Image: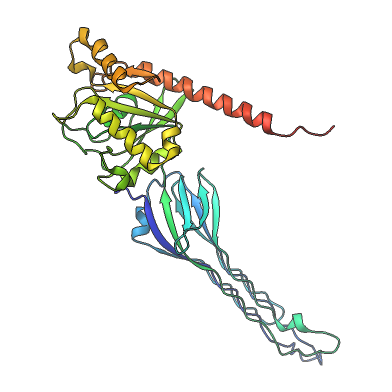
């Protein structure tokens, strides 16, 4: 399935049904009076986060979504039927903007969450509503109001606990294949990953987390070079970034340190939020070095970068060191969750006695 993370759609709520002007005409009830009923409300349009939808590709083929119009009122005080609402499934992680103004309308982050994006029109009133002591036979009725019509821009940001960041061919796809059931394309040339891949990492029966692999970032990605501009945004929802560094780069004129500095520079240009996220250094492809040289070579990279955070040495291809990395990630995420719960408990006001 083609991965699409942006789409523009039009949503049209149903108009309200018009009221009815009618009078009782029973044979043995003279001067029966008005009995025109109200119309029905127009249906509204809702976006619904749905688990089994993971891309916005369907909106490329169906860009207009309409709710049903309310039925007109009838005689004998019959109210028109309300128009059926339109529920549009979207992937969890979808952000909704007003296309013309850029105003953010809402963010659908959890499955089952609904967002009203176009409200149906209000029903018209039948002539029964206008009856009074001085107007016993009203002829007037009102039409239903128009439903809302809007152009929306949908933007999908994948929801994952951990994001993989690195140059093309650094081994991100190999890592996610090694630790999860995701099967992204792996080959010995750059840009094998063309869209984000999500994998669930299970460290045991009860503990797991979601890891996201995005296309490799190249120099100038923040300005639109390569695929970086399109997919860097997917890292904004993650709680931890793994900076994957190839200790034997694909490009002969590239060094691990220069590649790492390019990634850091692109993060700084993209957003302060990404720069401020927890980030670990993961030195990959240690299987390409003699075993007795791995420690010295990796330490030289760390020293030249001036890195003071966590560092891991792995071979995603040989599955060396990956288990220890996954357990460390799980411990970190659980610790962050505990700290967030404690902070929310302290901020919540105490109940009065």
Left or right: where does residue 131 sit relative to residue 87? right
Q: Nearer the viewer, residue 210 or 16?
A: 210
Q: Is residue 2 above or below residue 72?
A: above
Residue drawn at x 34%, y 18% is 312
Q: Is residue 138 above or below residue 239?
A: below
Quick one: which residue is furthest to the left in this view?
252
Measured from the top left, where is residue 292 in percent x and y?
21, 7
Q: How is the image coloured?
A: rainbow
Q: Is residue 228 visible?
A: no
Q: Quadrant of residue 189?
A: top left
Q: Nearer the viewer, residue 233 or 327?
A: 233
Residue drawn at x 53%, y 52% is 106
Quick one: which residue is furthest to the top in this view?
292
Q: Nearer the viewer, residue 176 or 202?
A: 176
Residue drawn at x 23%, y 25% is 256
Q: Is residue 244 above or below residue 83?
A: above
Q: Is residue 53 above or below residue 353?
A: below
Left or right: where does residue 237 sit relative to residue 191? right
Left or right: where does residue 335 sit relative to residue 231? right
Q: Nearer the viewer, residue 185 or 283?
A: 283
Measured from the top left, where is residue 310 in percent x and y?
39, 19
Q: Is residue 112 visible?
A: yes
Measured from the top left, where is residue 232 in percent x and y?
35, 41
Measured from the top left, where is residue 174 in percent x and y?
26, 28
Left or right: where does residue 43 sit relative to residue 132? left
């Amino acid at each position: 399935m083609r991965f699409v993370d942006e789409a523009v759609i039009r949503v049209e709520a149903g108009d309200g049904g018009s009221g009815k002007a009618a009078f009782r005409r029973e044979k043995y009830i003279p001067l029966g009076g008005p009995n025109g009923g109200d119309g029905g409300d127009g249906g509204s349009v809702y976006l619904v986060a749905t688990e089994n939808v993971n891309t916005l590709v369907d909106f490329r083929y169906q860009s207009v979504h309409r709710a049903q119009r309310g039925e007109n009122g009838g005689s004998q005080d019959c109210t028109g039927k309300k128009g059926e609402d339109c529920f549009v499934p979207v992937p969890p992680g979808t952000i909704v903007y007003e296309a013309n103004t850029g105003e953010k309308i809402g963010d659908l982050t959890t499955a089952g969450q609904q967002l009203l994006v176009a409200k149906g029109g209000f029903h018209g009133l039948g002539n029964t509503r206008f009856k009074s002591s001085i107007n016993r036979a009203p002829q007037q009725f009102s039409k239903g109001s128009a439903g809302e019509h809007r152009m929306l821009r949908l933007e999908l940001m994948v929801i994952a606990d951990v994001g993989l960041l690195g140059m093309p061919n650094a081994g991100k796809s190999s890592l996610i294949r090694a630790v999860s059931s995701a099967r992204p394309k792996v080959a010995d040339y750059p840009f094998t990953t063309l869209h984000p891949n999500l994998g669930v990492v299970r460290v045991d029966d009860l503990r797991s987390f979601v890891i996201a692999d995005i296309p490799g970032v190249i120099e100038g990605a923040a300005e639109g070079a390569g695929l970086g501009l399109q997919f860097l945004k997917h890292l904004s929802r993650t709680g931890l970034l793994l900076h994957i560094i190839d200790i034997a780069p694909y490009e002969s004129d590239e060094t691990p340190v220069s590649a790492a500095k390019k990634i850091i520079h692109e993060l700084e240009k993209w957003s302060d939020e990404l720069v401020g996220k927890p980030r670990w250094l993961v030195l990959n492809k240690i299987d390409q070095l003699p075993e007795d040289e791995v420690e010295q070579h990796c330490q030289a990279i760390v020293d030249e970068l001036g890195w003071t955070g966590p560092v891991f040495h792995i071979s995603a291809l040989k599955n060396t060191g990956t288990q220890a990395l996954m357990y460390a990630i799980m411990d970190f995420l659980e610790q962050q969750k505990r700290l967030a719960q404690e902070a929310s408990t302290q901020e919540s006001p105490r109940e009065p006695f």
